[in-house]
Image (tube, helix red, strand yellow):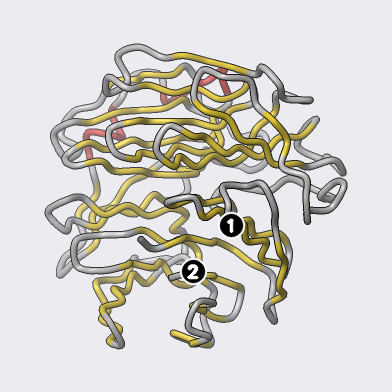
């Protein structure tokens, strides 16, 4: 399954099916009951085979990110660095609004901090605030600890099979002990400013550029702890912008990039790529197992 969310529809490029139309897809997340999608920044749906079920709806179209816990709990990150559990009834995660230092969080690209990305691994939650650092909860949001300082400028967090990785303005960071210790690297990267990250086993894929307003975006890969090499064959010499949060994914040797209306797919771990085009600009892209 190759899910492509656009400004107008949700597509499965592997089957050629249009799963829904007439809605902007804000975020996608896997869960025990099937894939979940946040539509128009407001409505959460679950995709199960050919059925679409509405999970719940926010009071406003201010949703930004999405994660689903192992027990099926759906969490939406919202503008202003807020978190809401969405289901039969809405419940704000009050403990997150009381974490120390949040009064000093600032977003250089907007009036309030963003809940830019959220990831889950078992009972663990990881929340990337832009710009407010990376926060971890191991009790479904009842308590929180900061694991990366705001100054790192984290743009995406991903949790895969016990490993946590972040794309930040200072490079890639990863942890294999639930965030208690971190390793960082920029080795092999032409530039250290990263906007997207994905993990496939012990291999990391990142998008890199020279800054937020770049015309020189690129994708790199590396085994954790080894130097990065740039993905080249079949890709543009440079992407004319950043490959953003939610626009890069990798599963079992398959890697996908979404940029503008173009989907770039590698079936060999990033060694070579082929491109196809969808009708509207891509907002998020994810691979199913």
Q: Which mark is residue 285?
A: none
Residue at image location 35% in from the left, 20% down from the top: 146
Element type at mark 1: strand
Name which residue lies at 44% across and 35% down. 128
Mark identifier at residue 256: 1
Residues tagged 1 and 2 counted as in contact (Cβ below 8 A)? yes
Above or below, 151 relative to 142:
above
Q: On the rendered image, what quadrant is the N terminus found in?
A: bottom left
Packing grade of label 1 (10 A; few <14, some 14-19, many >=20) is many
Q: Position of residue 40 (x, y in %)?
A: 49, 71
The residue pinned by badge 2 equals 2
Most foreground residue, 272 or 67: 272
Above or below, comparing residue 26 to residue 182 in the picture: below
Q: Across the whole image, how many numbered discs are drawn on residues?
A: 2
Of the numbered discs 1 and 2, the one sitting upstream in the chain is 2
Front residue (pair 272, 225):
272
Q: Nearer the viewer, residue 202 or 100?
A: 202
**Residue under the point 32% across and 74% down:** 45
**Which residue is rendered at x = 41% and y = 27% of the image?**
134
Examine the rendering and report whether any part of residue 10 can be seen: no
């Amino acid at each position: 399954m190759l899910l492509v969310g656009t400004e107008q529809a949700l597509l499965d490029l592997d089957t050629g099916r249009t799963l829904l139309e007439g809605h902007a897809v804000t975020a996608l997340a896997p869960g025990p009951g099937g894939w979940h999608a946040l539509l128009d920044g407001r409505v959460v749906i679950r995709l199960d085979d050919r059925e679409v079920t509405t999970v719940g709806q926010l009071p406003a179209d201010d949703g930004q990110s999405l994660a689903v816990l192992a027990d099926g709990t759906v969490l939406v990150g919202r503008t202003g660095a807020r978190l809401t559990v969405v289901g039969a009834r809405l419940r704000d995660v009050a403990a997150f609004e009381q974490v120390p230092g949040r009064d000093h969080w600032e977003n250089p690209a907007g009036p309030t901090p963003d809940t830019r990305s959220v990831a889950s691994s078992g009972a663990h939650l990881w929340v990337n605030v832009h710009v407010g650092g990376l926060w971890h909860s191991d009790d479904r949001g009842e308590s929180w600890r900061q694991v990366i300082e705001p100054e790192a400028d984290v743009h995406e967090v991903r949790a895969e099979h016990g490993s946590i990785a972040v794309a930040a303005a200072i490079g890639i960071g990863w942890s294999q002990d639930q965030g208690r210790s971190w390793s960082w690297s920029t080795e092999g990267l032409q530039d250290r400013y990263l906007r997207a990250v994905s993990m496939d086993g012990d291999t990391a894929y990142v998008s890199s550029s020279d800054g937020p307003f770049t015309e020189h975006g690129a994708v790199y890969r590396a085994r954790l702890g080894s130097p990065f090499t740039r993905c080249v064959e079949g890709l543009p010499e440079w992407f004319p912008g950043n490959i953003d949060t939610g626009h890069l994914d990798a599963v079992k040797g398959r890697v996908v990039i979404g940029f503008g209306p173009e989907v770039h797919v590698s079936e060999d771990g990033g060694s070579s790529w082929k491109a196809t085009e969808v009708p509207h600009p891509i907002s998020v892209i994810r691979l199913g197992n």
